[in-house]
Amino acid sequence: MRIVVCIAFIMVVVVGCKAPKAKVTEKEKMLEVLKAVKGNGVLFGHQDTYAYGYYWKDVEGNSDVKRVAGDYPAVFGWELGGIEKGVEANLDTITFDNIRKYAVKAYGQGGINTFSWHPFSVIDRVDSWNTDKRVVDKIIPGGEFHEAFKEDLDALADFLNSVIATNGVKVPFIFRPWHEMDGTWFWWGSTCCTPEEFKELFRFTVEYLRNEKGLDQMLVAYSPDRNFYTREEYLTWYPGDEYVDVIGMDNYYDLYTEGLLDEAVKKLHIVIEYANEKGKVSALTESGYENIPDPTWYTSKLGRVLSDSIVAANISYALVWRNDPLKHFFFPYPEHASAKYAKEFLSRKDVWLLNDLVQFKNSSH
Ligand code: BMA
């Protein structure tokens, strides 16, 4: 009997050893990279960087970050608002075909893609900034427009599943839905729904995309704006650990308003502490100073925040918003007075552009 047990044990060990290892997915690899950069470099991100910049649009290989700093950002932000309407271009007039092309390119170059989504409400197709009506309670499960909302998610998922690299791999990405919910400017904001309704919207969105639409290449970011002072406040809208991979904060105001820089740092500490406790990634998911009226902003404000030792040792990326000459810009064009400060900031050893990220990946894998 003993011998039989012994043989059985040996077989289990041997067979166990030979069992094929589960393949590491692209999403898992991306998550590992986001974790591994912690304390080495903060990845710099820019919204719509290949799409347009100051007085150019869709010029192959162009990016205002590249024009100023000599390299592309490491994180590439794209916007999907409008996909739910079945139109050709997003709300900022970039065609979805181009967005797909840019995201595939960014991935092929070794960068990380993140998608935001400012959808038009399924109820009457008013834009995300229209807060006249309550929308959230009507699109969550049990709501009158829930089935219609699912069709919006179908359109979103079809697009995201069509972002496929040349080697056939579905391009992994960070999805950042329903951000700045602690503000009052979106129909999913704090004046238009309760925290419980919000959480249900967030959970349903992630579950539906993951389970029904097979978006297994997706990481998810939680990004309140700056309206919190404690962990409890920060987590008011948090849907739960199983729905979120990137613990984030959007913050513009604290980073350009005199005297509030320390607030930005303190809030990032809350974000970081929670992320670390849960083994998740932390990030400054959106920032910038509209039209950069203070030319030194990149060194004296963003640079100072990223010089805080806890922030520098922990956050994985910081992304600045888009450069649309018709609306506003957040990264300098080469002739702008802030260009030399942005360049100086981006030449820091611990602030990484695309080549830094690629070198890091090559040296550590
Ligand atoms: C906002 C502005 C808008 C834009 C939206 C989605 O912050 O830049 O002009 O439509 O983001 O990209």
Image (cartoon, rainbow, N blue to C red):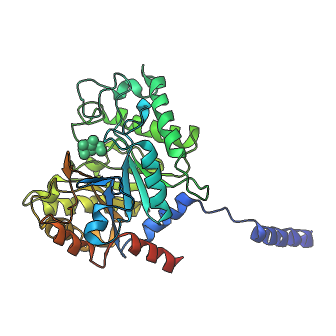
Q: Quadrant of residue 117?
A: top left
Residue 318 found in image quarter: bottom left
* Front residue of this view, candidates 231 and 283: 283
Q: Residue at x 24, y 30 (%)?
A: 130
Q: Is residue 20 above or below residue 142?
A: below
Residue 181 appears in view: no
Question: What's the residue at 22%, 41% (across, down)?
Answer: 183
Q: Is residue 7 left or right of residue 13?
A: right
In front of the other: 235 or 207: 207
Residue 276 visible? The answer is yes
Of residues 148 and 311, which is closer to you in this image? 148
Q: Quadrant of ligand 1?
A: top left
Q: Position of residue 341 (x, y in %)?
A: 17, 71
Quadrant in which the C terminus appears: bottom right
In x, y percent, where is residue 313?
32, 73
Q: Position of residue 119 (x, y in %)?
A: 36, 35
Front-most of 265 and 218?
Answer: 218
Left or right of 298? Residue 65 is right
Residue 22's image quarter? Answer: bottom right
User: Does residue 313 appear left or right of residue 151 in this picture?
Assistant: left
**Rendered residue at 42%/29% (across/down):** 140
Figure quadrant of the N terminus = bottom right
